[in-house]
Structure formats: structure tokens, C-alpha cells
Image (tube, rainbow, N blue to C red):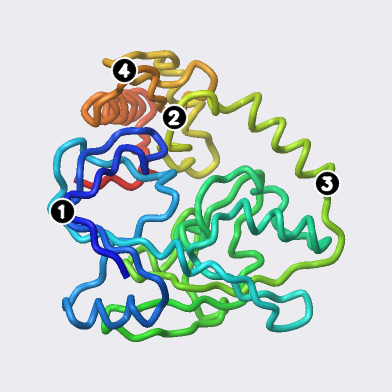
Amino acid sequence: MRVEKNYSLKERSYIKIGGTVKEMVFFDNCEELVQFSKDRGERPFILGNCSNILFSDKQIDALFGSIDSIKGINEVGELTYEIGAGLKFKEVINFMKKNDLSGLENIAGIPGTVGGLAVINAGAYKKEIFENIVEVEYLDAEFNIVRKKREDIKYGYRTTEFKERKDIITKIVLKFEKGFKWSDMTNLLQARKEKQPLEYPNLGSVFKNPPGDFAARLIEDCGLKGKVEGGAQISEKHANFIVNRENASFDDVIFLKELAKKMVFEKFGITLEEEIIIKY
């Protein structure tokens, strides 16, 4: 275990915005995470790939942690694998390719760690990671490591009970099928490249899609596509993305997010709900 004081968040941030956090703890295993949490009487906020977190660019008086070292893949049944939450999701896709496994090709392009995707039930192209989850291991509010089967877990569109309770997912168990679908993955990755502003630092979709509609369409219909504030911009390619074009600040992004939310409500009577996580 390693502890860093006044840890810089900017380079870890996917949108390249962030100040410092008072304390950042790097855990080597679950046992260290449990013991540390018990000793401190609180659980750290775990940072994965930070691909959907907007950090304040000032100092954040909080306790953050990393479980990047918890990243093993172990076979636990037929086509069933236990995976450490700190593993980058792209490594799961590489493992699927190598072992001719199928099931998560549609979400291959989502940046993040296994735990990060699981805690928000990440998805794309009509596929969510929870469709393949069998079981989740997590650290609860009483500092116990608990395991739950999928059928006993409350989850929905871009949310889970773990997100609501701020539990720390440490491992998940995934069930696959045989036969990696190369063409499906290749076609969807190409579509993602064409439709999303991957050439700029960003946080993915800023808002959840409201029922029966798309946040990007609503924002675009308000005339906000391409809107600039400081170094940030509502993407010209996809209106539900805010990109860092040139040294954007936290306030630049917040301004555009709030503007989009205000104008969509005024024009359509719809309150957009944030998909990104904001840490002050």
C-alpha cells in the first residue's frame, strides 16, 4: 500500500482537468483496502480510469483510492471468469479475443476499469455489462466484503445499488459464450470513431438519455452544438459530449453542462440527468 499527499488529478483525468486531492491511497489487494477502511472508519472514493469523472481544478478535501492492482482473471466455471475490478476493460476485450469468448463486443470501446463499468452498469449500442454479470464482490458500508448474485442486485439504466450506496466493487464474475464476434466489434468501434469526438479529451456522455429520446438530439435542437466556453466546447460531432479543446477549466465545463440542462428544460420541459460524476 502506498499513500500520496496532495495527489495531482489532472493527468489521471480523462478530460485532463483537475487540481489535487488531499490524500490518495494505492492498494495492492482487497485485504489492505478492508483494513485501511476499518482503521480510518471510512471508505475511500475509488478512482478507476476516471473516464466519467469531472474533478474540481482546486484542492479536493477528500480521501481517494486506487485498486488498479486488483486485476486478475480467474476461470471459475464453464465460460465463467472472476475479474478484478481494477483491470482496464480493454484488457477484458483482449482476453475475449485470445480465448474466443463473446458477449461484450458491443461495449468494447468504453474506456474504464471493470469496477467502474460495473458500478454504473455501463453500456452502449443496446448492450449493458450487467447482462453478462453473474456475481459481484464489494466492500459495504460496514467494511465487510460481500458477494451478491445478479438476481439479488438492483440495477438499471446507468445505475446500480452499489453506485447509490457508494459501495466499492472489488471483483465481478462474468459469463461468456463461445465465438468472438470480430465484425460486430469492428463495425461498432468504427461507428464510435465517426460519431464521437474521440480526438479530444472528454468524459463520454454528459447526460443520460431521457426515456424515449436522446440527450444529444435535445441539446442540438437547442442550438448548442459547437457552443464554446473558455477552453471547453459542446462537441460539434456529438452534442452530449463536452470536450477539452484547449486548457479548459472545471468552471468552463460546468457552465456548458448547466446551460444545456437549462435550455433543454426551457424548450422541452425535460430535466436532463447527469451521467458523469462531479467531485468538488
Marks 4/3: CA distance?
A: 38 Å
Residue 9, image quadrant: top left
Q: Nearer the viewer, residue 118 or 150?
A: 118
Q: Position of residue 53 (x, y in %)?
A: 35, 45
Marks 2/4: CA distance?
A: 11 Å
> Residue at position x 49%, y 16% from top?
236
Mark 1 or 4: in front is 1
Q: Considering the numbered disc 3 on the image, is that residue within a helix, a strand or a loop?
A: helix
Marks 2/3: CA distance?
A: 27 Å
Q: Position of residue 55 (x, y in %)?
A: 27, 41
Residue that mark 4 sits on: 231
Q: Considering the numbered disc 2 on the image, is that residue within a helix, a strand or a loop?
A: loop
Residue that mark 1 sits on: 22
Q: Amino acid type of disc 2?
A: Pro
Q: Nearer the viewer, residue 221 or 81?
A: 81
- The answer to whether residue 246 is above or below residue 83 is above
Number of residues whose C-alpha sits closer than 10 Å to that of mark 4, classed few (under 14), some (14–19) or many (20 or more): some
Q: Amino acid type of disc 1?
A: Lys
Q: Tell me which numbered mark, 2 or 3, is placed earlier along the sequence.
A: 3
Q: Position of residue 256 (x, y in %)?
A: 30, 24
Number of residues whose C-alpha sits closer than 10 Å to that of mark 3, classed few (under 14), some (14–19) or many (20 or more): few
Q: Amino acid type of disc 4?
A: Gly
Q: Nearer the viewer, residue 88 or 174?
A: 88
Marks 2/1: CA distance?
A: 24 Å
Q: Tell me which numbered mark, 3 or 1, is placed earlier along the sequence.
A: 1
> Residue at position x 64%, y 28% from top?
193
* CB within 8 Å, label 3 to label 1: no
Q: Tell me which numbered mark, 4 or 3, is placed earlier along the sequence.
A: 3
In the rendered image, the quadrant that contains the C terminus is top left
Which label was assigned to residue 182?
Answer: 3
Mark 3 or 1: in front is 1
